[in-house]
Image (spheres, rainbow, N blue to C red):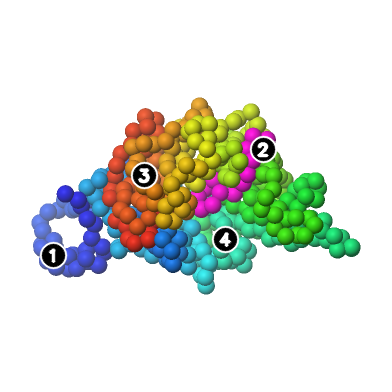
Amino acid sequence: MKKHFLNLKTIGLLTLAFGLITSCSDDDGGSTDPNQPTEDSRWITVAAARMGDNPGDGNGGTLVYSINSEDAKDPAVSIAPFDNGFIAPSNRTARLQSSEDGNTLFNISYAGDTGGNYTKYTVNGGQNFSKTGSEVSIAPYVGTAPRWIKLFDGDQTGAAVYVSNENEFDEDGKYTRTNAIMGVVTLDLENSIIKEFEESNIPLSPEEEAEGYYISRIDMPTLNKAGDKLYIGARLSKVDPNTTESDSDFEILGSKTIVLDYPSLLNPTIITSTVGHGNTNGYRSINAFEYNGSVYQANQSDPEGSHILKINSNNEYDNEYVFNLDDALGVQGAYILAWRPAENGKAVIAYRHDGSAEGVAGPQGFFALADLNARTAQKIDAIPYDQDFYLFQYQGFVVDGTEIYLTQAPVGKNGNIYVVETETGEVTKGAELVNTTGSHFIGVF
């Protein structure tokens, strides 16, 4: 029999109805809430993206609902965030982050009148999220639709970025280059204040710029182990130098990353991989992680399939490290949509490939278990798949030791939480996720 969680209004009514009984109890031992995390547990916050105009677009807003990790692993538990969830303020899909212990949820609204507003919530279980601390807007620095991420520095700092572009011409009106200006702001997550803001030019090589290449999008700042450099992923675009029209049929260059001094955000340089080609900015999910002294980064739109790239402690790409997902999984056109390593260097990867079925919202997605040290990966067959299982907007995994929590549910269909024990590959089917028409789940936090 499934356990269905009641919303807070219902709980409140029941509490009033039975208040006399509980107040007259002579049990001096007190009571505990069975839904609260125990000493060995933590909150698992499920994020659900409601449909806007089209199935899977996620533009109808984001709802969150939290349960403890024991219930998250229990298939007899059923939760319905679209009915009972807390609305995370955002005009479109919220950009969420959580504290490492799961007790705090961080949100920066995306687009609309409140776009760029930072808020922080204490997680209390169910739909109960209590706003804590003050708010601050980063919109004056990086706009109302910011690309932001929480740095792995003990939940102290968030970083948001933007890039603007402008074509430049010589005195004869001939195109010379496209200038890219990067803005980076760091945010004190505890005290809700701006720490640093810097703008910088980020030029490519003269040869690349003469051909019309430029950095068109940046995202996913990542702090190195030493804490003195910030890596920012980049996407390259190109114009036709003869017409300045957008050029979509061009040679994909080696993957690039912007390296900045931290915390000053000064002295940007660009490093280039000779192993991977394509973009390193990711999309909705963190795209690079520090592990064992190096930073491991996914790339996208690589003609040879997505790679996991490695940046060494010398702040340069390790071009001896080759981890190609096409080769590891035996597929063509692998595209890493989101990923997260555990503390042992083993990771869960959300991906699609050229053989993915076309679903109602886009190509079908899958999960794989990868090993950064062995450079191996295999599809997780214990998780069920559906042609409408859409992972392009996937945002969050929860790492608890060597376990990784994730959500599985096709667009508009029910699904479950799953927990992957990365050491053994064992997969636990957990709580049921009740869906609604055209909507989907975008992860756990």
Quadrant hosting residue 306? top right
Cα distance between the residues tagged 2 and 3: 34 Å
Q: Is residue 92 left or right of residue 438?
A: right
Question: Is residue 232 placed above or below 51 in the rendered structure?
Answer: above
Residue under pointer 1: 18
Residue under pointer 4: 146
Cα distance between the residues tagged 4 and 2: 27 Å
Q: Is residue 284 magenta?
A: yes
Q: Is residue 267 left or right of residue 220?
A: right
Cα distance between the residues tagged 1 and 3: 44 Å
Question: Is residue 118 placed above or below 421 in the rendered structure?
Answer: below
Cα distance between the residues tagged 1 and 2: 65 Å
Closest to the observer, 305 or 343: 305
Secondary structure mostly seen in the magenta stretch: loop
In front: mark 4 or mark 1?
4
Residue under pointer 2: 273
Q: Is residue 402 magenta?
A: no
Residue under pointer 3: 385
Residue found at x 77% / y 60%: 243
Closest to the observer, 185 or 376: 376
Going from N to C along the chain, the mark reached first, 4 or 2, is 4
Magenta span: 274-289
Asked if the residue at tag 3 contacts the one at tag 1, i.e. Cβ–Cβ closer than 8 Å, the answer is no
Quadrant hosting residue 311? top right
In front: mark 1 or mark 3?
3
Classify mark 2: residues with Cα within 10 Å, few (<14), some (14-19) or many (20+): some
Cα distance between the residues tagged 3 and 4: 32 Å
Q: Residue furthest bottom?
A: 113
